[in-house]
Amino acid sequence: MAGTTKGGRAAAKKNKTLYGKDFYARIGAEGGRRGHTGGFAANRELARVAGARGGRVSRRNKSDR
């Protein structure tokens, strides 16, 4: 049943039985705490510069223009 909705529900039920009803809340919270990059939201100017660079790099051949 791996990869099916029914299998996923069975796995979730077993995880909750083995590790407690708050299993998914705990692993989700841990993932949030471990994040440390901040992303572009932390530095809008960096996002603007990176977007401009990416926009200048064309992946098309000159003959396609």
Image (tube, rainbow, N blue to C red):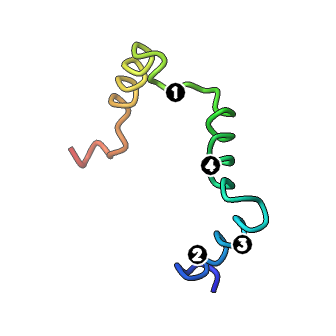
Q: Earlier in the sequence, mark 4 or mark 3?
A: 3
**Residue type pointed to by label 4:** Ala
Distance, label 2 to label 4, CA atoms, is 16 Å
Quarter of the image where one finds residue 51: top left
Secondary structure of residue under mark 3:
helix
Distance, label 4 to label 1, CA atoms, is 23 Å
Q: Are marks 4 and 3 in contact (CB under 8 Å)?
A: no
To which residue does mark 3 refer? 14
Q: Nearer the viewer, mark 1 or mark 2?
A: 2
Q: Earlier in the sequence, mark 3 or mark 2?
A: 2
To which residue does mark 2 refer? 9
To which residue does mark 1 refer? 39
Residue most toward the left?
Answer: 65
Distance, label 4 to label 3, CA atoms, is 15 Å
Position of residue 25 relative to residue 47, above or below, is below
Distance, label 3 to label 2, CA atoms, is 9 Å
The location of residue 47, given as percent across then percent down, is 41, 21
Circle 2 crowding by C-alpha within 10 Å: few under 14, some 14–19, many from 20: few
Q: Nearer the viewer, mark 1 or mark 3?
A: 3
Secondary structure of residue under mark 1:
loop
**Residue type pointed to by label 1:** Gly
In the displayed structure, does residue 23 sit left or right of residue 44?
Answer: right
To which residue does mark 4 refer? 25
Q: Nearer the viewer, mark 4 or mark 1?
A: 4
Quarter of the image where one finds residue 56: top left
Residue drawn at point x = 79 percent, y = 66 percent: 18
Residue drawn at point x = 55 percent, y = 81 percent: 4
The location of residue 15, given as percent across then percent down, is 72, 66
